[in-house]
Image (spheres, grey):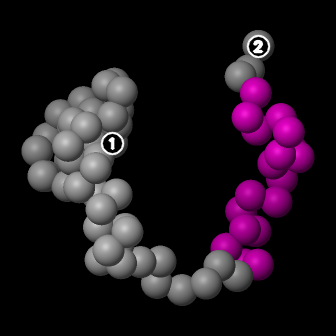
Amino acid sequence: MPSVKCPTCRKFGDWFAGKYGPFCSHRCRLVDLGKWFAAEHVISEPLKPEHFTKYADLPPGKYLDQPED
């Protein structure tokens, strides 16, 4: 897997291999969560039906959360 940049501290590494991915550490993960709670991060616009068109062929939701055999 290629190196990715931690969204909080911007260090590069294989963060998805660890338990905090895409963050490099528990601290960076909590800093990001705090920014959502403080409204520093926001979703820029409401979701619209056209945002979901590329997912129309997926099976019903009960199958999405189960591991593949």
- In the displayed structure, 32 sits above or below 36; it is above
Q: Quadrant of residue 48?
A: bottom right
How far from the left and from the top, in percent, is residue 32?
29, 58
- Which stretch appears magenta? 49-66
Q: Nearer the viewer, mark 2 or mark 1?
A: 1
Residue 32 in the magenta stretch? The answer is no
Residue at left offset 65%, top offset 79%: 47
Q: Compare marks 2 and 1 and give the one earlier in the sequence.
A: 1
| Depth check, front residue: 13 or 32 | 32
Identify the residue under disc 2: 69
How far from the left and from the top, in percent, is residue 44?
46, 84
How far from the left and from the top, in percent, is residue 45?
54, 86
Asked if residue 13 lies left or right of residue 51, the reply is left
- In the displayed structure, 3 sits above or below 56; it is above
Q: How many numbered tags mark residues here?
A: 2
Residue 22 circle label: 1
Quarter of the figure with the C terminus: top right
Q: Mark 1: which amino acid?
A: Pro
Residue at left offset 33%, top offset 34%: 20
Q: Mark 2: which amino acid?
A: Asp
How far from the left and from the top, in percent, is residue 54?
71, 62
The answer, for residue 26, to whether it is visible in the render is yes
Residue at left offset 76%, top offset 38%: 64
